[in-house]
Image: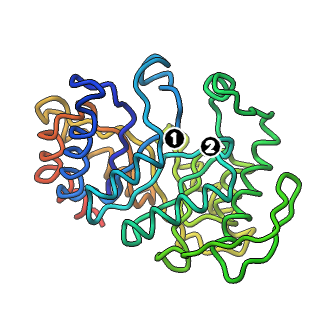
Amino acid sequence: MKLGLQIPNFTWAGGPAKLGSDLAAVARTADQAGFDYVGVMDHFFQIRGVGPSENDMLEAYTTLGFLAAHTERAKLLTVITGVLYRHPGLLAKAITTLDVLSGGRAVLGIGAGWNEEESKGLGFPFPPTAERFELLEENLQYILQMWGDGDAAFSSKHFDAERLLNSPQALSRPHPPIMIGGGGEKKTLRFVAKYGDACNIFNTPDVEHKLDVLKQHCENEGRDYNEITKTAYHTLDIGEKGEKTGELLADLERLHTLGFDAAIGSVPGVPDVSLLEKFATDVIPAAEKLG
C-alpha cells in the first residue's frame, strides 16, 4: 500500500516570506520518508473545509515545478486539476515540462472541476455540469493525442487546434499517467475505464460500491480493471504525537483489502516535518507490508 502526501494548506506560521523554505523542507522530508506521491490542490482560492477563501493559495503547476527541484523519487501531481482552469494544450505542455524536468515523475490529475466561487471571482467561465463533463472528455482526448505520435490537427465541440506539436515529449512512456478524480458513476468512472491509468475516489462509506461500478465500466470498455491504479483520498492523521497511528494503519488495511493501491491525503500538522519523519518509521514500512 503506497502513500501520497497532498499539501492543501499554505497558511503557515512563518507567512509568505518563509513559505519557500518551509515547503522545500516538507517536500524533501516526505520524499525521503518514502511517500510515493507528493501533490497539491489545483485551486486559486482556499476551499471550504480547509480555510477561508482569503487564506494563502499557491498556483499548482508553478508549485509542482518547485517541488520537483526539492524531491528525487516521489511522483508529482495535482489532486485534482479542474478542466476549467487551463486550455488542454497548455495543460499538456505543463505536465510534459514537469515530467521532463523531474526525470519522468509527473502525473496528470484531472477532473470536471466544481469551485464556482473562484472561477467567477477571477473571471473564468463556469459552465453547467454537463458541459464540464464534455470538456473533461475532450481534454482527455486532446492531451492523449498531444502525447501520441505526430502533430495532427484536433477538432471537437469545444476545441479546434491546427497542430498538436509537443516537443520535447514526456519521458514517461507511453505518457505520464492520467489520474481521474471523482466518484461519479455515470461519467467520471466511465472515463477512468476508457482513458485513465488511475482513479482517485474519496474514502466515503460507499467506496466499495464505487469500485464495483468502475469494474463494470472496465468490462463494458474491454479494459483490464487490474491495469488501473486505485487511489483513495484519505486524511493521513497520526495525531500530534503519533497517538492515532494504529487507527490510520487499520484504515489503510481496510482500503488495501477493498483493492486500493494507494491512499493520498493531507497530514494534519504539516509543515511540522517531525510528523513526516514518523511516517518513515511508524507508518510507511507497515503500509508496504500490506502489499
Q: Which residue is mark 1?
A: 42
Which badge, 1 or 2, is on the more N-terminal residue?
1
Q: Which x, y percent locates residue 278? A: 12, 45
Residue at the limit of the structure toward the bottom, as seen here = 149
Q: Is residue 248 left or right of residue 241?
A: right
Helix, strand or loop at disc 2? strand
Q: Which x, y percent locates residue 35? A: 27, 56
Graded by Cα atoms within 10 Å as few (under 14), some (14 to 19) or many (20 or more), the crowding at tag 2 reads: many
Residue at the location (50% across, 38% down)? 204
Q: Nearer the viewer, residue 7 or 1?
A: 7
Instruction: Work out whether residue 217 can be spotted.
Output: yes
The answer to whether 155 is drawn above or below residue 109 in the figure is below
Residue at the location (68% across, 51% down)? 188
Residue 119 falls in image quadrant: top right
Graded by Cα atoms within 10 Å as few (under 14), some (14 to 19) or many (20 or more), the crowding at tag 1 reads: many
Kindly indicate whether the residue at mark 2 contacts the one at mark 1 (C-beta within 8 angstroms).
yes
Residue at the limit of the structure toward the right, as seen here = 157
